[in-house]
Amino acid sequence: MKKLILVFVFLGLISCGDYIDKPKNLVDQDVMAEVIADLVINDQANFMYQNRNMEAGTRFILKSHNIKPDDFVESFKYYVIKEEMEGIANDAQQILLKKDPKAEKYVKDKLKQTELGMPQK
C-alpha cells in the first residue's frame, strides 16, 4: 500500500511540470523589453501631462511593435510566472539608459540611496 501511494505521489509531481502553458503568440523577450521601455516613457509623459489619455499611448506602442493587447498580457503573465520578468525589466532599463544617457546618473544615485538605506524622495 505504501508503495502504491508513493507511486501516485511521484506521478503527480512529474505531471505538474509547468504551472502555465506557453502562450500561442508569445512575445519575444527582447521585444517585450522594448515595449516595456516604451511604456515607461509613455507613463512619464502621462505624469507630466496628467489630463492625457494613457490608453491611447499604450495602444499606439503595442501597434507600433505589431503586438495584440491580449498577446502582450498573456506573455507578461507567462514571463512573471516563469520568473523571467526581472531579466526583461533589466533589459528594458538598459534600453532606457541608451535612449537617455543622463538617466544613468539618476539611476545610480537611487541605487546608492537604496543600498545605504536612505529615505527616497
Image (cartoon, grey):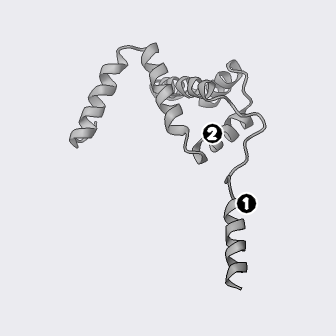
Q: Position of residue 35 (x, y in %)?
A: 60, 25
Residue 45 in the image: state x and y as whole percent.
49, 23
> Where in the figure is residue 26, as x and y percent of width and height?
71, 34
Relative vertical location of residue 25 with respect to residue 81 in this rendering, above or below: above
Q: Quadrant of the N terminus?
A: bottom right
Could you say whether the residue bearing mark 2 is in a helix, strand or loop? helix
In terms of depth relative to the viewer, which is nearer, 1 or 22?
Answer: 1
Label whose residue precedes the other's in the sequence (1 or 2): 1
Marking on residue 76: 2
Q: Residues within 10 Å of mark 1 (few under 14, many from 20)?
A: few
In the rendered image of this protein, does residue 36 appear above or below residue 7?
above
* Three-letter amino acid code of the residue under disc 2: Phe
Under mark 1, the amino acid is Ser
Q: Nearer the viewer, residue 40 or 117?
A: 117
- Label 1 to label 2, Cα distance in Å? 24 Å
Q: Residue at x 72, y 73 (%)?
A: 8
Q: Is residue 84 left or right of residue 59?
A: left
Q: Residue at x 57, y 23 (%)?
A: 34
Query: Residue 4, located in which quarter of the rendered image?
Result: bottom right
- Name the quadrant containing residue 85: top right
Dot 1: element: helix
Q: Residues within 10 Å of mark 2 (few under 14, many from 20)?
A: some
User: Residue 62 appears at what percent x and percent y?
Assistant: 67, 25
Up the image or down, 58 lies above or below 9; here it is: above
Image quarter of residue 106 = top left
- Disc number for residue 68: none
Q: Which residue is mark 1?
A: 15
State which quarter of the image contains the C terminus. top left
At horizontal 25% and vertical 39% (from top left) the residue drawn is: 115
